[in-house]
Amino acid sequence: MLEGLIIEQLHLNHQAPLAERNAAGRYLDGIVSRPVLSGIDLSVAPGEFVALVGPSGSGKTMTAMSVLRLLPPQVRIDSGAIRLNGLDLAQSREADLNRIRGGRIGMLYQQPKRMFNPRRTIGNHLAEPLKLHQGLRGRNAKARAKDLLAEAGLEDPASCALAYPHQLSGGMAQRAMMALALAGRPELLLADEPTSALDKVLERQILQLIDRERHERGLGVLYITHNLATVAAFADRVVVMDAGRIRESGRARAVLTDPKTACTKNLLDAATLMPPPRSVPVAPSPKLRLSETPESPCLRGFRRYS
C-alpha cells in the first residue's frame, strides 16, 4: 500500500557569514546558523487534501521547497527524513530529483505567468513533461496537451496551446499551470497559494478542479495558504505553522470549530474578518462600459484569449 508523502523531524538551517568586526575593523571569520524549520512532522496520504496554513514567513513554502529539494543556497537540511512512497527524497541524487520534479511531484505556483517562459507557447511547455515523463512526442504529445488543457477547464484548448503566457488571463494561466502540473501523472501535488491572485469565483473553480483530480486519481495534495476560509470546504486535515514550527494539526472540522492555539484562532479571526459598516453612505461610482474605455495598443488582438 502506498504511504504518500511523509516528513519526519525535518530541521532546516540558514547559514550566513559572520557579520561582526574585530577592533581593527576587519570582519571575523565564521558562519552564523539560525533555524528555519524545526522538527516538522507532516504526512499526505494518496487522495488526501492537507492544508498547510500559517501567516507570512511561517515556513510553509520552505516546507514545500524541501520536498522538491529546491532550497536557496544558504539553506540546508540539517536533519530529518522526507519520503514519497518509500523513496527518500532527502538523500536522492540531483539526476533522480530531476525525474521526480514534474513527474511524481507536480507543482502549482502563486503567480503562474512568472513561471512560464514568455518565449514559448503553452503547448511547448506541455510538450516537455509529456516527452520526459510519458514518452510522448509529435502528434501524440499535441493531442495529449489539448486533452490536459480541456481537463483543466479551458474552453478552447487548441487556441490555448498556441497562445503565449501573456495572452492568457490570470484564471486561464492558472488552469494552464494545472495542466502542466498534471502532465507527468504525479502522485503528489504541491500547491503554493495558487489562487491568492484570483477572484473568489475563479478561486473556487481551481479548488474544485484540484479536488476532482485527487478523488478521481488518488492524487495527494499539500495546499499552502494563509487563508483558512479558502480551504475549509475541501481540506481533510489542517496543519497550522508559525515561526518554523507546527503549532496545531488535526482533522479540518476539529481545527476549524475548536482551535487549540492562539495562532489558529488568529488565522480564523482573520478569515472571518468583515469590514466595519460605513457611517456615511457613499454614492456608487459610475460604471464604464468597455466600448467607452480607450483601448491600449498592448491589448489589441488578444480579446479572443480573455
Image (spheres, rainbow, N blue to C red):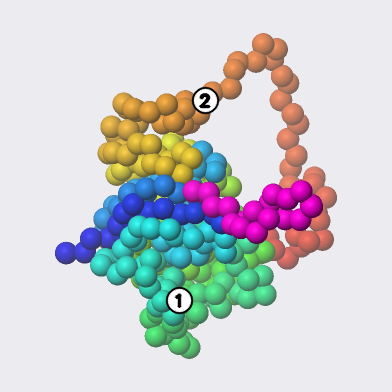
| Mark-to-mark CA distance, 2 and 1 | 44 Å
Q: Residue at x 37, y 48 (%)?
A: 39
Above/below status of 164 relative to 216: below
Q: Which residue is drawn at 42% across and 42% down?
A: 245
Span shown in magenta: 16-36
Above/below status of 104 relative to 72: below
Quadrant including the C terminus: bottom right
Residues 58 and 199: in front is 58
Residue 120's tag is none
Dividing the picture into quarters, in which one does residue 15 lie?
Answer: bottom right
Q: Which residue is drawn at 51% across and 69% down?
A: 157
Quadrant including the N terminus: bottom left
Percent coordinates x, y for residue 113 in the rendering: 62, 61
Is 158 magenta? The answer is no
Is 29 magenta? The answer is yes
Local SS, label 1? helix
Above/below status of 208 relative to 218: above
Q: Which residue is drawn at 23% across and 60% down?
A: 3
Residue for badge 1: 94
Percent coordinates x, y for residue 276 in the rendering: 59, 17
Q: Closer to the N terminus: mark 2 or mark 1? A: 1
Q: Describe residue 73's horizontal placement relative to residue 303 as left or right.
A: left
Please state which amino acid type lies under the numbered disc 2: Leu
Secondary structure predominantly adopted by residues drawn in magenta: loop
Q: Describe residue 182's horizontal placement relative to residue 274 as left or right.
A: left
Q: Describe residue 246's horizontal placement relative to residue 306 as left or right.
A: left
Please state which amino acid type lies under the numbered disc 1: Glu
Above/below status of 10 relative to 235: below
Give the total of numbered labels: 2
Local SS, label 2? loop
Residue for badge 2: 273
